[in-house]
Image (spheres, rainbow, N blue to C red):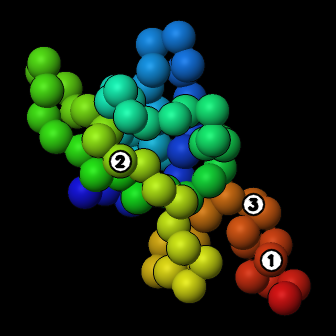
Amino acid sequence: MATGQISAIDSVNRTISLSSGEIFRAGPKVKLSTRRIGENIIVVYEAADGGLQAVKVRRVPQSLENFVPLSERSSNAQDAQANP
């Protein structure tokens, strides 16, 4: 399992890149159309074909946003934190 902020989505190659540099190939059940750059996510993955395949991708629940390091948060999340 990995957590982080989405830095890129490649719908042609079906990959999600995190700001940490990790790249996951989306498995057949992962809907990339519901994901957005800057979104903090939790990725459940497995090793497959020499890479990492995302089996499940979920948005980090609002109650856990505070556990995502400030450097990994989107600017929108930082603004919301500063101006509740």
Taking the spot 61% from the left edge, 64% from the top edge, the residue there is 73
Q: Is residue 82 above or below residue 24?
A: below
Q: Which amino acid, mark 1? A: Ala
Q: Name which of mark 3 and mark 1 comes first in the sequence.
A: 3
Q: Which amino acid, mark 2? A: Lys
Residue 79's image quarter? Answer: bottom right
Residue 80's image quarter? Answer: bottom right
Across and down, in percent, residue 69 comes to 49, 72
Q: Which residue is mark 2?
A: 56
Element carrying mark 3? helix
Q: Which residue is mark 3?
A: 75
Q: Using a 10 Å C-alpha cutoff, classify the residue at mark 3 as few (fewer than 14 neighbours), some (14 to 19) or many (20 or more).
A: few
Across and down, in percent, residue 81 comes to 75, 82
Q: Nearer the viewer, mark 2 or mark 1?
A: 2
Q: Name which of mark 2 and mark 1 comes first in the sequence.
A: 2
Is residue 44 shown left or right of residue 14?
left
The answer to whether residue 31 of the structure is visible from this angle is yes
Q: Nearer the viewer, mark 3 or mark 1?
A: 1
Instruction: Tell me the distance, in whole angstroms, between the alpha carbons under discs 2 and 1.
Output: 27 Å
Quadrant holding the N terminus: bottom left
Q: Using a 10 Å C-alpha cutoff, classify the residue at mark 1 as few (fewer than 14 neighbours), some (14 to 19) or many (20 or more).
A: few
Element carrying mark 1? helix
Q: Which residue is mark 1?
A: 80
Instruction: Tell me the distance, in whole angstroms, between the alpha carbons under discs 3 and 2.
Output: 25 Å
Quadrant holding the C terminus: bottom right
Q: Which amino acid, mark 3? A: Ser
The answer to whether residue 23 of the structure is visible from this angle is no
Taking the spot 13% from the left edge, 26% from the top edge, the residue there is 48
Of residues 20 and 41, the one drawn nearer to the viewer in this rendering: 41
Across and down, in percent, residue 10 comes to 54, 21
